[in-house]
Amino acid sequence: MAEKPVEELLRKYLGLSMPRIALGVLMLIFGILILVFPAVLWILVGLYLIISGVLVIVDEYTRSQKAKGTSSS
């Protein structure tokens, strides 16, 4: 399936682990919106990049907090 390689790429290159169900729902919503409204493709791509960026930042912040917590113990 398509979600498997996407999940592997997110984990490998971005260090991001997103629940597969969330990734699947996001892909379905964007796919349906592109089929119904092809003119909003650029908006959806922008939103996807913003969402991905926020997830990466949150993931890195969480990892840094865990690293601080384990190194001080």
Image (cartoon, rainbow, N blue to C red):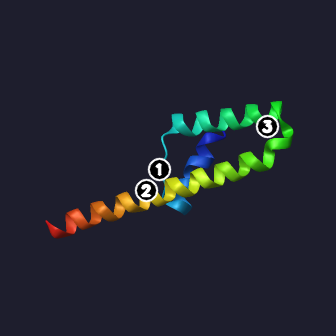
**In the image, farthest residue toward the right:** 39
Q: Which residue is drawn at 52% across and 55% down?
A: 54
Out of 51 and 22, give the one closest to the viewer.
51
Q: From what the image shows, is residue 44 above or below residue 69?
A: above
Q: Mark 3 sits on what residue?
A: 34
Q: In this figure, which residue is indicated by the disc labeled 2?
A: 59
Location of residue 14 in the rendering, given as x and y in whole percent from the top left corner: 53, 61
Asked whether the beta carbons under mark 1 and mark 2 sit within 8 Å of each other, the answer is yes
- Residue at 65% x, 49% y: name it: 48
Considering the image in quadrants, where does the C terminus appear? bottom left
> SS for tag 1?
loop
Sort mark 1 into few (<14), some (14-19) or many (20+) by Cα contacts within 10 Å.
some
Q: Which residue, given by chain and number where applicable, does mark 1 sit on?
A: 17
Crowding at label 3, few (<14), some or many (≥20) Cα neighbours within 10 Å? some
Q: Residue at x 67, y 33 (%)?
A: 29
- The kind of secondary structure element at disc 3 is helix
**What kind of residue is marked 2?**
Asp
Residue plotted at (36% across, 60% down): 63
